[in-house]
Image (cartoon, helix red, strand yellow):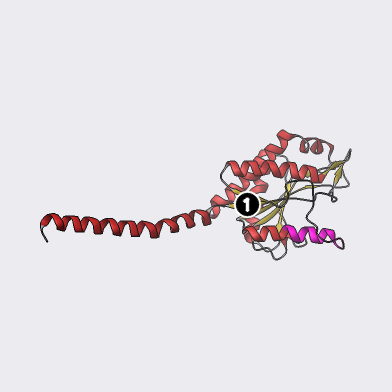
């Protein structure tokens, strides 16, 4: 084999090797990118025939939950998160007439499990017999350290961004259905009290809802940054 043919042979061989390597590694790179993308599940509490708590005059928790959840979805998607919603309209997920509440919650949990999220955020509002009580509070499943870290982070962000006079701390709970046998970091964010006239007015405000959504996002981001 003369020198010219030898160079041609080795050049072709090098190209074949490079193409083979690239065809092997490229799909692996893509798979890793998809797997590492943060997936968040947002649950807007109640809906449909289940109004949740009712504020005066007839302000329904389900409507505030959905409005705020959709704003949080926008913030997350703007920051390159993949978001799944348990509901995006005024309906519940019950498929049984016998025990609608349990059926609704079971189907919400199924959506969560199907999408294997990095975290789950359930949006709710609070209420209390005394109208003086106010302030956002985050709940997490008892015994889940990951959920506690997420709850603490969101609680801190809500206090800093919404109400510095709020001295509430994230609190554990062993009773909520969504918390049971749930392996994912999950929190319920009670964004305020519908029984407090001032907070009720704020919670109906689009600008306040956007602010609350931004705080929840910031708390989530701080948690995820600390985890990585």
- Left/right of residue 6 with respect to residue 52 in the rendered view: left
For this view, does 190 lie left or right of residue 12?
A: right
Identity of the residue drawn at 80% across and 57% down: 94
Neighbour class for label 1 at 10 Å: few (<14), some, many (≥20)? many
Circle 1 sits in a helix, a strand or a loop, which is it?
Answer: strand
Residue 85 visible in rendering: yes
Q: Quadrant of residue 177?
A: bottom right
**Magenta residue span:** 96-108
Relative vertical location of residue 19 with respect to residue 90 in this rendering, above or below: below
- Comparing 93 with 8, the one in front is 8
Q: Is residue 43 magenta?
A: no
Q: Is residue 204 left or right of residue 149?
A: right
Along the line of sight, which residue is nearer the eye, 215 or 159? 215
Image spot of residue 165 (x, y percent): 72, 40
> Which quadrant of the structure image shows residue 28?
bottom left
Q: What residue is at 59 percent from the left and 41 percent from the top?
A: 78
**In the rendered image, the vertical position of residue 58 relative to residue 86, given as above or below:** above
Quadrant where the image shows the N terminus: bottom left
Q: Position of residue 158 (x, y in %)?
A: 68, 43
Q: What residue would you read off at disc 1?
A: 40
Rendering coords of residue 14 (x, y %)? 25, 57
Q: Which residue is rendered at x = 63% and y = 57% of the image?
A: 115
Residue 198 sits in which quadrant? top right
* Residue ID at (73%, 57%): 108
């Amino acid at each position: 084999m003369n020198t010219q043919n030898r160079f041609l042979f080795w050049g072709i061989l090098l190209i074949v090797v490079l193409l083979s390597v690239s065809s092997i590694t490229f799909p692996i790179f893509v798979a890793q990118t998809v797997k590492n993308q943060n997936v968040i599940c947002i649950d807007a509490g109640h809906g449909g025939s289940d109004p949740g708590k009712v504020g005066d005059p007839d302000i329904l928790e389900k409507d505030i939950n959905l409005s705020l959840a959709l704003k949080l979805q926008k913030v997350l998607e703007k920051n390159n998160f993949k978001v799944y919603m348990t509901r995006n309209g005024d309906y519940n997920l019950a498929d049984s007439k016998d025990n609608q509440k349990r059926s609704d919650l079971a189907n919400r949990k199924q959506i969560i499990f199907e999408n294997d999220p990095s975290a789950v955020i359930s949006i709710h509002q609070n209420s209390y017999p005394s109208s003086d009580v106010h302030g956002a509070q985050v709940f997490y499943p008892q015994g889940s350290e990951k959920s506690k870290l997420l709850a603490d982070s969101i609680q801190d962000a809500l206090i800093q961004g919404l109400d510095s006079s709020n001295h509430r701390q994230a609190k554990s709970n062993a009773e909520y259905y969504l918390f049971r046998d749930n392996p994912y970091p999950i929190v319920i964010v009670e964004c305020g009290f519908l029984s407090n006239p001032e907070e009720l007015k704020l919670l109906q405000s689009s600008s306040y809802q956007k602010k609350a959504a931004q705080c929840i996002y910031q708390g989530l981001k701080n948690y995820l940054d600390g985890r990585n």
